[in-house]
Amino acid sequence: MAMPDGVKTHPDYPVPETMKAWVLGDPGQLSLVDKPVPVPRKAEVLVRIDAVAICATDLEIIYNGPPALIRGGPPHNKGFTPGHEYMGTVVALGPGVDEYRIGERVTVEIHAGCGQCKRCRMGMYTSCHNYGKNWGDVDKGHRANGFTTDGGFCEYQVNSVNTLIHVADSMSDEEATLVVTAGTSMYGLTELGGLVAGESVVVMGPGPIGLLGAAVAKALGASPVILTGTRDNRLEMGLKLGADHVINVRNEDAVEAVRRLTGGRGVDYVLECSGATNAVNEAARMLNRGGKICLAAFPHEAVPVDVAYLVRNNIYLYGIRGEGKSATHRAEAFMREKRFDATVIHTHTFDMTELPEAIRYARDRVEDAIKVVVKNRHAAARAIAAQ
């Protein structure tokens, strides 16, 4: 593919004119089509996508729409390609890019803020005020791949250099797709204060973010780390990832158990990853006075919250969006140093051509699927063949 002036390529990594991409039609309907390979602009690179993990938010987008926002509305029937937890190989450099080199393995963050609005200037690029306003026109700078711009269920995608994280050679493609998940957990703990060494933490909900939340909290020195959930096999994974105690909320009252494990004091922090209807109220009652809650999951309906209890006990409530404040870089460093084994939550792998089946496994938890990864063997094979 002939790239515009200023875009650097290399013969060892040929770039085709078109690529295979999954496009969202009606809710729940994906079609495999040909799309032009995107071209990197200033401060961007083109990534050959090697692997993508399926996130619960991808399922929300595919079947319901939000939080994706395309042309001011739902993403259905707009030529949109979802998918955001991807990694791959840099194959072209946009004008002015020297931070990365062609052939380098990277994983990606979702959000590249515009860099100009109030929140971006504060480092809160996942809260960019220009979110969702630039489908088809990225000159403003904002991108949220898989949410407001095309995502990773395809062969190639453009990313801002601000969203790239170097991947160590010791890390498999599958593990590299989990850096964003660990980064979301890291971001939640960052907002709770960051320095959690010696502090007590409850993680509610042993989904991917909750399981890696327990792992990150332990790697940061938290003690004890308590994981709550409803499935024993997930809780067992939590123990492997560093949780000191697990509580099956079907068998015992979680608040009473947390109080018992902490000598009646309660914990310092709660990372809420379940999205359960009464999660905020339960989290508040697990805390000691002056404690903090971070909400990393969203319920599907409005929920009642005992605000008076929060106020009387000086409890702080935070919400996070995505994996902000470069938390992915810190999460990748922990994973590179084997501070925890994120691959524990990777359960299934499919080829990109089998994406609908992979989504079914993730949605229906077939064979107790937790993190399902699709690999883009076709793109890699085509690149090799072109040589």
Image: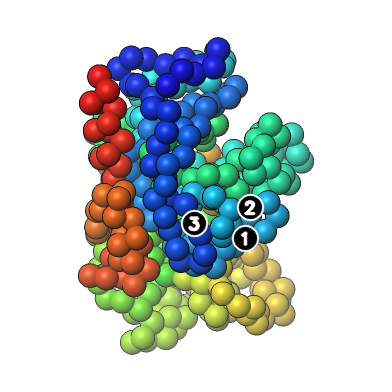
Camera-nearest residue between 272 and 256: 272
- Which image quarter: residue 229? bottom left
Residue 168 horizontal/vertical position (percent): 31, 31
Q: Report the amino acid beneath label 2.
A: Ile
Residue found at x 53% / y 50%: 80
Query: Few, some or many C-alpha atoms within 10 Å of disc 1 (few <14, some 14-19, many ≥20)?
Result: some
Camera-nearest residue between 226 and 129: 129
**Does residue 169 appear left or right of residue 20 in this picture?**
left
Report the coloring of the rendering. rainbow
Camera-nearest residue between 12 and 260: 12
Residue found at x 51% / y 59%: 25
Q: Which mark is residue 24?
A: 3
Camera-nearest residue between 217 and 153: 153
The residue carrying mark 2 is 70
Query: Few, some or many C-alpha atoms within 10 Å of disc 3 (few <14, some 14-19, many ≥20)?
Result: many
Quarter of the image that includes the N terminus:
top left
Q: Report the amino acid beneath label 3.
A: Leu
**Does residue 67 appear left or right of residue 366 in this picture?**
right
Residue 170's place in the image compared with 296, above or below, is above
Q: Report the amino acid beneath label 1.
A: Pro
Q: Which mark is residue 99?
A: none
Residue 274 horizontal/vertical position (percent): 47, 71
Residue 381's place in the image compared with 187, above or below, is above
Q: Are marks 1 and 2 in contact (CB under 8 Å)?
A: yes
Residue found at x 24% / y 53%: 349
Residue 269 horizontal/vertical position (percent): 52, 63
Residue 130 horizontal/vertical position (percent): 72, 44
Q: What secondary structure is marked by label 2?
A: loop
The residue carrying mark 1 is 74
